[in-house]
Image (spheres, rainbow, N blue to C red):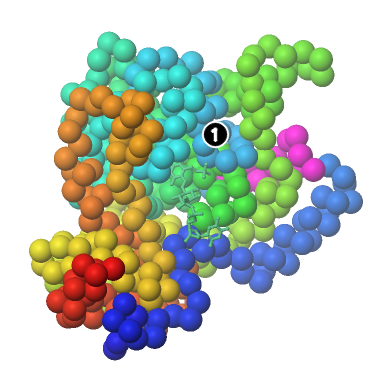
Amino acid sequence: MSLAILGGHPAFSKPQLVGAPFVEPEVREKYHELMDQVFDRKYFTNNGPLVQRFESEIAAIHQVAHCSVTCNATIAQILLLKALGLKGEIILPSFTFIATAHACIWQNLDVVFCDITPDTLMIDPEKAERLITPRTCAIIGVHLFGNVCNVKALTKLCEKHGVKLIFDAAHAFNCSLGDTPVGSFGNGEFLSFHATKFLETFEGGAVLTSVMELNERIDHLRNFGFVDYDKVTSLGINGKMSESSAAMGLASLPMIARRTEKLAYVHRAYRNALDGIPGIRMLPIGETGRSNYHYAVIFVDQERFSVSRDTLNAALWKENIQTRRYFYPGCHQMDYYRSERPSHADPLEVTRLVSQQVICLPTNLDNPDSDTRTIGGVIHEVHLKAEEVNQWESHA
Ligand code: T4K
C-alpha cells in the first residue's frame, strides 16, 4: 500500500465522514409521506401532531414519563438549566462538545471544569466532589460516545451535597445502564437529534424527565413563556421543534435496530482490523449496558505507534478518511474559555492527555468489511512507514 501523503492514491475516492447521516430508502419514503400530510394540514410548527407523536415515541423508548422535543440539544440544555432555576457554579467535564459548557454560560452559570476517568472518558465523581463549594448548584455528567456515566456514584454525590444532577445524553439515544435506559437519571437528561447523530431530525433535541412539573415548565419556556394567547408569564424562548424535523425523526425510528446492528458490526470489524497494531487501542463501548455504537474511538499512544496522533490524523485525511479529534483540546483550552474564564481549580491532567490521543473513526460505512479493513490497513501502514511519515510531517 502506498500512502497518499507519500505520493500514493487516496484509499477512498469519496470522503468517509464521522457522523454521516443514514437516510435509508425507507426513511426517505416515509419522510415524504409524512411531509405530504404536513403540507395538506398546513400546520408546520408550534407543537403540531407529529411533534406530539415523536415525543410519545421517544419517551416510550427511554421508558421515561416525559419528553419535550426542541430545535436542538443546546437549547434543550438551556431550557433544562433555566427550568431547574439553577444559579451559581456548575460542575461539568471539559472533555465534551463545546455546547455543554456554552449552554451553562448562556444561563449565567459559572462553569467549573472537572477531569474525567481515563478508562471511560467521562466525569470522575471523586474529582467532582473535590470541586463542590457552597456555590455549586449542579453537576452535569456527559454520557459519551454511546457509553453511560457512573450514574450511581454521581447520584449519591449529588444527594449527599444537595445539588442537582443533569445528564448530557446527546450521544446516548437508546443507550442504557444495565437494563435502565437513559432518560430518567438525575433531574433531567437531554438528547441531540443533530444531523450527525444516531437518530437525526436535521436539527433537534429533547429533554427527558420523570418530573411532571419540570416537563410542564420546559414546555412553557420553549414557547416564549406563553400561558394563553395574550399572556406571557416568563422569559421564554423559541425552542420548538418543527413538524418537518419531527417527520424525519418518526421516519427514522423504525431503523433503530438495523442501525444499531450495523454499527455494532462496524465496531467488531474495526477491532479485527486494528488488532495487533502497536500503540492503537479502541475505547470499549457498551460494556455497562446497551449502546448505539454510533462512535468508534481509538487512542494513539505516540511512543508505541511511533507517529503522533495529529500526524496520523493528517495522513488519514489525505486518504479521504475524515476522522475527527473529538474532543480536542477540551473546552477549557478553547480560546473563549482561556481568555474570558481562565481559572479552574482542577489541572485536568487526564483530559489533557486523552484529548491528545483520541481519534473518532467513520462508522456509517457503505461496505463495513472492506472499508474497516482499508482504514485499519492505512493506520498500520502509517506505523510501518513511521520514519518516512514523520519526515513528511516535518516538511509539511
Ligand atoms: N453535547 C454533546 C456531547 C454533543 O456532542 C453535542 C453536539 C451537543 C451537546 C449539542 O447538540 P446540538 O445542539 O448540536 O443538537 C458536530 C455536530 O454539529 C454537533 O451536533 C455534535 N455534538 C458534534 C459532536 O459534532 P462539528 O462542529 O464537528 O460539525 P461538522 O459540521 O464539522 O460535522 C461533523 C461531521 O459530520 C463531518 O464529518 C461532516 C458530517 N456531516 C455533517 C453534517 C452537518 C454530514 O455528513 N452531514 C451533515 O449534514 O459538530
Q: Is residue 228 visible?
A: yes
Q: In this image, 181 relative to 83: left or right?
A: left
Residue lying at 42% horizontally and 14% vertically, measured from the top left: 87
Magenta region, residue range: 44-59
Q: Position of residue 125 (x, y in %)?
A: 23, 32
Toward which corner of the image does residue 371 lie, by quadrant? Answer: bottom left
Query: Compared to 137, does 279 lie above or below?
Result: below
Dot 1, crowdedness within 10 Å: few (<14), some or many (≥20)? many
Q: Position of residue 180 (x, y in %)?
A: 40, 44
**x then y, percent, for residue 185:** 40, 34
Q: Amino acid at mark 1?
A: Ala
Q: Quadrant of residue 60?
A: top right
Kindly tell me whether mark 1's CB lies below 8 Å from ligand 1: yes
Q: Is residue 56 left or right of residue 267?
A: right
**Residue 386 appears left or right of 199:** left
The magenta stretch spans residue 107: no
Q: Which SS class for mark 1?
A: helix
